[in-house]
Image (cartoon, rainbow, N blue to C red):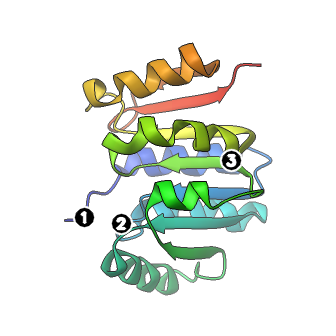
């Protein structure tokens, strides 16, 4: 099943990336590439590069075709991997912008690695208003334990914006 972001979320992601000094973007949860296209278009405009990760080879294959059709495949590196494994294996890789739209049950486990890979950048998490109970512990951990600034904006299915609070 393909669970795409809303068009308003796509436009919001485009705006956030376009209006930033982002050089490296990470998307966790590629699906068929709808949100990837929004992010990649903005990345191409500002000269940024992008990694996108999904555990489904079928979804990555579909997304790859969609990106090629939009002539955006030169901006995006596709990865077939579990999001948590990818984050752990990042070592010294840092991202300015991370879009998270994956397995919400894993977010709390990924929190430390997510914060580590963001280089004074922005983490945007989809479904913050449609699935608030699933995100509550993750949100509290980010703000209370990791000192991140967390706010929710009612765009699309709700976007949780997370930045370094230091």
**Relative horizontal placement of residue 160, taking residue 23 as reference (left or right):** left
Dot 3, crowdedness within 10 Å: few (<14), some or many (≥20)?
many
- Residue occupying image coordinates x 65% and y 57%: 25
Residue at which label 3 appears: 117
Horizontal and vertical percent position of residue 23: 78, 57
Q: Earlier in the sequence, mark 1 or mark 2?
A: 1
Which residue lies most toward the top here?
Answer: 144
In the image, 10 versus 33, the foreground residue is 33
Dot 1, crowdedness within 10 Å: few (<14), some or many (≥20)?
few
Disc number at residue 31?
2
- Residue occupying image coordinates x 52% and y 74%: 79
Label 2 to label 3: alpha-carbon separation: 22 Å
**Relative horizontal placement of residue 97, taking residue 92 as reference (left or right):** left
Q: Quadrant of residue 105?
A: top left
Label 3 to label 1: alpha-carbon separation: 27 Å
- Residue occupying image coordinates x 70% and y 19%: 165
Horizontal and vertical percent position of residue 131: 26, 32
Disc number at residue 2?
1
Q: In which quarter of the image is residue 61?
A: bottom left
Q: Quick check: can you spot residue 4?
A: yes
Contact check, label 2 and label 3, Cβ < 8 Å = no
Secondary structure found at label 1: loop
Q: Quick check: can you spot residue 37?
A: no
**Relative horizontal placement of residue 13, taking residue 104 as reference (left or right):** right
Dot 2, crowdedness within 10 Å: few (<14), some or many (≥20)?
many
Contact check, label 1 and label 2, Cβ < 8 Å = yes
Q: Earlier in the sequence, mark 2 or mark 3?
A: 2
């Amino acid at each position: 099943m393909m669970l795409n972001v809303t068009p308003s979320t796509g436009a919001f992601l485009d705006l956030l990336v376009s209006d930033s000094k982002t050089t490296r973007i990470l998307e966790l949860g590629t699906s068929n590439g709808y949100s990837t296209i929004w992010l990649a278009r903005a990345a191409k405009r500002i000269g940024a590069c992008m990694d996108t990760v999904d555990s489904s080879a079928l979804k990555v294959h579909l997304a790859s075709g969609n990106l090629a059709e939009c002539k955006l495949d030169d901006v995006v590196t596709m990865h077939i991997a579990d999001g948590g494994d990818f984050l752990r294996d990042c070592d010294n890789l840092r991202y300015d912008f991370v879009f998270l739209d994956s397995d919400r049950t894993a977010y709390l486990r990924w929190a430390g690695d997510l914060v580590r890979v963001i280089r004074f950048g922005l983490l945007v998490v989809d479904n913050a208003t449609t699935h608030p109970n699933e995100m509550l512990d993750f949100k509290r951990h980010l703000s209370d334990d990791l000192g991140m600034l967390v706010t929710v904006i009612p765009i699309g299915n709700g976007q949780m914006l997370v930045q370094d609070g230091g």
